[in-house]
Amino acid sequence: MDKFRNMRNDMLAERVIKGLASRNMEGFYVHTKEEAKELALSLMPEGSSVGWGGSMTAKDIGLIDAVIEGNYKEINRDTAKTPEEKNKLSREMFFADYFITGCNAMTEDGVMVNIDGNGNRVAAIVFGPSHVIVICGMNKIVRDEAAAFSRARNEAAPVNAQRFGLETPCSKTGVCADCKSPDTICCQFLTTRYSKHKGRIKVILVNEDLGF
Ligand code: SF4
């Protein structure tokens, strides 16, 4: 990142963190992926049970590998051999000490927006795991909720649909057509505007472009 982009992001992150605090969520800001990974690990005591949603960001910063290789009881849906087993692990996730996720967009004043197809990721953000750790690149910060929904719907969702090779209009055109395709990943829209439990949700802002 260049000097002026850094200056802008440093100030913006401060604003987001204040917004998060006003919403009973805790925000942190780091400059690099490595710092983000180390910070996330330091927030999760060894021996904790840890699960995660399908977050490219958490994978990109090396956090998922570090959890798998570390001294944690991981709940890893990727190890499931059958849909039934995957479903069982998704349910076990609700009892995890920590749930790691990315987000699709976040407003400058700390409102988080996520879209989900299956619903397990947004469900675990809402309720279940004792702690939620969100890794969010500064590229996901937008002005307001309308912009957050627009980003989630018009940017994150089409890229994810393409990534998974889904039969949706956006996977062919790159543009949302508000589809009702059986393959749609836009079944659930979650707006997290306040956490009932202070500090349950911790957001690590990273001054890098991460995820979609
Ligand atoms: S609603 Fe359908 S077309 Fe629009 S982003 Fe979601 S999956 Fe793609």
Image (tube, rainbow, N blue to C red):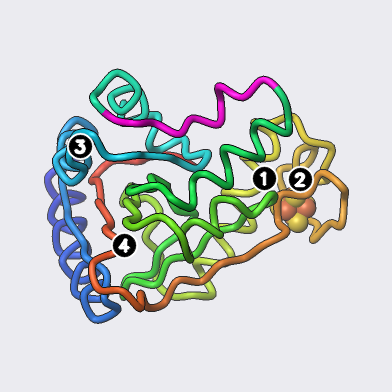
Dot 4 corresponds to which residue?
201
CB within 8 Å, label 4 to label 3: no
Figure quadrant of residue 195:
bottom left
Figure quadrant of residue 193:
bottom left
Alpha carbons under labels 2 and 3: distance apart: 36 Å
Dot 2 corresponds to which residue?
170
Image quarter where the N terminus lies is: top left
Residue shown at 49% from the left, 64% from the top = 113
CB within 8 Å, label 4 to label 2: no
Q: Is residue 164 above or below residue 107?
A: above
Alpha carbons under labels 3 and 1: distance apart: 31 Å
Say which label, 2 or 1, has the lower sequence index.
1
**Which circle, 3 or 1, is nearer the viewer?**
3
Say which label, 2 or 3, has the lower sequence index.
3
Residue shown at 38% from the left, 36% from the top = 58
CB within 8 Å, label 2 to label 1: yes
**Which circle, 4 or 2, is nearer the viewer?**
4
Say which label, 4 or 1, has the lower sequence index.
1
Magenta highlight range: 72-81
Q: Amino acid at mark 3?
A: Leu
Residue shown at 23% from the left, 45% from the top = 207
